[in-house]
Amino acid sequence: MSKRSHTRIALTATSLLAVSALMSPAATASSAPSGAHFGGTAAASQPKAWGPDAVNTASSREGTAPAKASYFASYGKVVLYYNDANAPSYRSLIASAASIWNSSLTRVQLVRTTGSGDIRYYEGNFGDAGSTARWSSPGHGTINIDYAQTNTYSPLRVVAHETGHVIGSLPDHYSGPCSELMSGGGPGPGCTSPYPNASERQRTDANY
């Protein structure tokens, strides 16, 4: 075999190794969706649960782009559409949580839609995982609202907490005080505050 043939074989092997490296889990780990749950006594020791797949952010943004552009021109805020069709029992609570976040932020506005949403809510019995959130980027994801957990904890705090995960990429901090929304169920069922504190508001706005 000629030296030229040896060279071609070596280059082919090198190329295959490079492609394999690019396709490995380590190379794609940074693009994986993030997730968290409300916590509390029952869920604190449980692994994080994801629920339904995250929203297809490309298609949802494309479908609402004209309305978003119009809203931004009128109000100077980034508009995120949420769909509550799969959580009808919590529709008023979701609207209240959206109103709380809207009044807390300067750069973001949550708006309900019956079409393709950036954020989708689901209700159901989700077992030990409780209420959970999964997001692929700030403002794009899915939220599961658990029946049992909202019967134990303040349902508005649960919904506002999970919404904070998706729109702010805010992590859980169960050891925090009740005044910290992302402390979730950590302070116990007696904590009912649904409002983000100054730091949570600032960190959420910084994403947009």
Image (tube, rainbow, N blue to C red):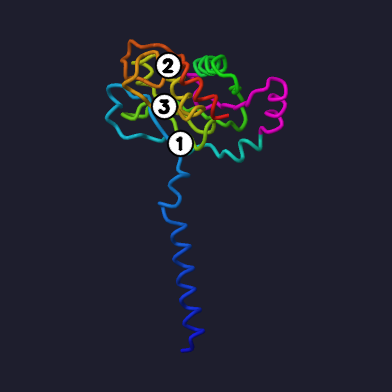
In the rendered image, residue 19 lying in the magenta stretch gets the answer: no
Amino acid type assigned to the residue bearing label 2 in the image: Arg
Is residue 133 depicted above or below 101 in this figure? below
Residue 186 position, x and y percent, is 32, 19
Residue at the farthest bottom position: 1
Residue 83 position, x and y percent, is 56, 27
Residue 167 position, x and y percent, is 52, 27
Circle 1 crowding by C-alpha within 10 Å: few under 14, some 14–19, many from 20 = some
Specify which label sits upstream in the sequence, 3 or 2: 3
Of badges 3 and 1, nearer the viewer stands 1
Residue, disc 3 = 124
Specify which label sits upstream in the sequence, 2 or 1: 1
Of badges 2 and 1, nearer the viewer stands 2
Residue, disc 1 = 52
Residue 204 position, x and y percent, is 51, 25
* Tags 3 and 1 touching, CB below 8 Å: no
Residue, disc 2 = 157
34 on left or right of 138 = left
In the rendered image, residue 69 lying in the magenta stretch gets the answer: yes
Q: Quadrant of residue 40?
A: top left
Write the residue at 47% across / 24% down. 164
Amino acid type assigned to the residue bearing label 3 in the image: Gly
| SS under mark 3 | strand
Circle 3 crowding by C-alpha within 10 Å: few under 14, some 14–19, many from 20 = some
Is residue 177 depicted above or below 82 in this figure? above
Q: Quadrant of residue 98?
A: top right
Write the residue at 66% across / 35% down. 63
Range of residues picked out in magenta: 64-91
Specify which label sits upstream in the sequence, 3 or 1: 1
| SS under mark 2 | helix
Is residue 36 depicted above or below 56 in this figure? above
